[in-house]
Image (tube, rainbow, N blue to C red):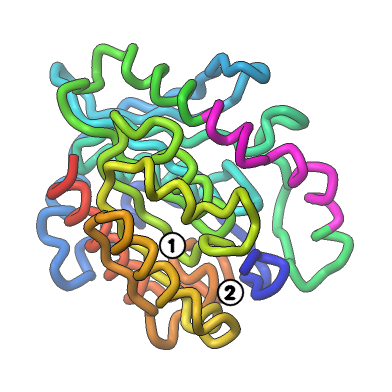
């Protein structure tokens, strides 16, 4: 399942304030710890990371003050690094993490790769990504993941005694799987939110990385993705069990593809906040 098959509709993606995310967190049940962390001042920077294939533009976040925290790589959805994913990076850093959010398409274009709104139902908008998407490959992602984690590990803010987390959205879900397969000694937690193509017949299917992984997995599936490919959840559960990986695979009833990404037509705040709480619980356990 990819964004072209079951898409997110119109994405307006306004620039969000810290206060907006703080209010979202405070309103969600079970997020007392996350809401309390929203007051934590965060350092945010635009950075460049050298990779074997070039120089990736990315956003970096970490808590202000002295200390060291576990690192996380956030893989955005098909529209790549933009304000809503910057806000996710900031919010996660407020909970005590060093967070890198890379531009998926750095090989061909710097972020933002799309200006203004983006409508998946508009062929002209989808065509804007046509030249970009082929630049993201399983092999290239593995190289990128190793470079991003090496970059994070070189920062004085990163606690290298603790494992790294990675999370992906839509097409970023497979990239999170590839990350755990590429750097298994470092990655301790993987989260996929409405990720597409996690279990396929291709020789590069993300689920094939599970045999190399040492991570715990959180795989949250959109309701309409599951209705189109109902076998995938069970295939993933079986693959995770065979690999001996602790995991939770869950279909979010009523939540559409893209439900966790604010700014899209299918954004579902209660379901998104539930998913965020599950993410924080995963990282607390596994990192």
Q: Is residue 186 above or below residue 253?
A: above
Left or right of 109, for residue 99: left
Q: Residues within 10 Å of mark 2 (few under 14, many from 20)?
A: some
Residue 238 appears at what percent x and percent y? 36, 69
In this view, the residue in front, 196 or 34, is 196
Q: Which secondary structure lies at badge 1?
A: strand
- Residue at 42%, 28% (x, y): give it: 60
- Which residue position holds label 2? 265
Span highlighted in magenta in the image: 127-144
- Which residue position holds label 1? 193
Residue 85 appears at what percent x and percent y? 48, 47
- Residue at 45%, 46% (x, y): give it: 209
Left or right of 286, for residue 228: right
Residue 42 in view of the camera = no
Location of the C terminus by quadrant is top left
In this view, the residue in front, 121 or 241, is 241
């Amino acid at each position: 399942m990819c964004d072209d098959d079951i898409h997110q509709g119109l994405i307006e993606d306004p620039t969000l304030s810290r206060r907006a995310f703080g209010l979202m967190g405070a309103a969600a049940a079970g997020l007392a710890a996350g809401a309390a962390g929203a007051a934590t001042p965060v350092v945010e920077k635009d950075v460049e990371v050298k990779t074997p294939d070039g120089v990736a533009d990315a956003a970096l976040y970490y808590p202000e003050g002295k200390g060291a925290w576990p690192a996380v790589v956030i893989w955005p959805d098909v529209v790549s690094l933009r304000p809503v994913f910057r806000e996710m990076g900031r919010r996660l850093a407020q909970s005590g993490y060093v967070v890198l959010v890379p531009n998926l398409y750095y090989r061909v274009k710097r972020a933002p790769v799309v200006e203004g709104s983006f409508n998946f139902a508009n062929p002209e908008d989808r065509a804007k990504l046509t030249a970009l998407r082929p630049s993201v490959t399983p092999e290239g992602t593995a190289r990128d993941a190793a470079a991003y984690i090496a970059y994070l590990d070189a920062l004085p803010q990163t606690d290298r005694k603790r494992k790294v987390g990675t999370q992906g959205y839509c097409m970023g879900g497979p990239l999170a799987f590839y990350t755990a397969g590429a750097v298994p000694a470092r990655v301790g937690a993987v989260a996929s939110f409405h990720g597409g193509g996690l279990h396929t017949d291709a020789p590069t299917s993300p689920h094939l990385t599970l045999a190399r992984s040492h991570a715990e997995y959180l795989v949250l599936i959109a309701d309409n993705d599951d209705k189109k490919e109902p076998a995938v959840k069970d295939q993933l559960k079986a693959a995770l069990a065979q690999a001996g990986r602790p995991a939770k695979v869950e279909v979010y009833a009523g939540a559409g593809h893209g439900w966790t990404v604010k700014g899209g037509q299918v954004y579902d705040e209660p379901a998104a906040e539930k998913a965020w709480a599950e993410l924080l619980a995963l990282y607390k356990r596994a990192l």
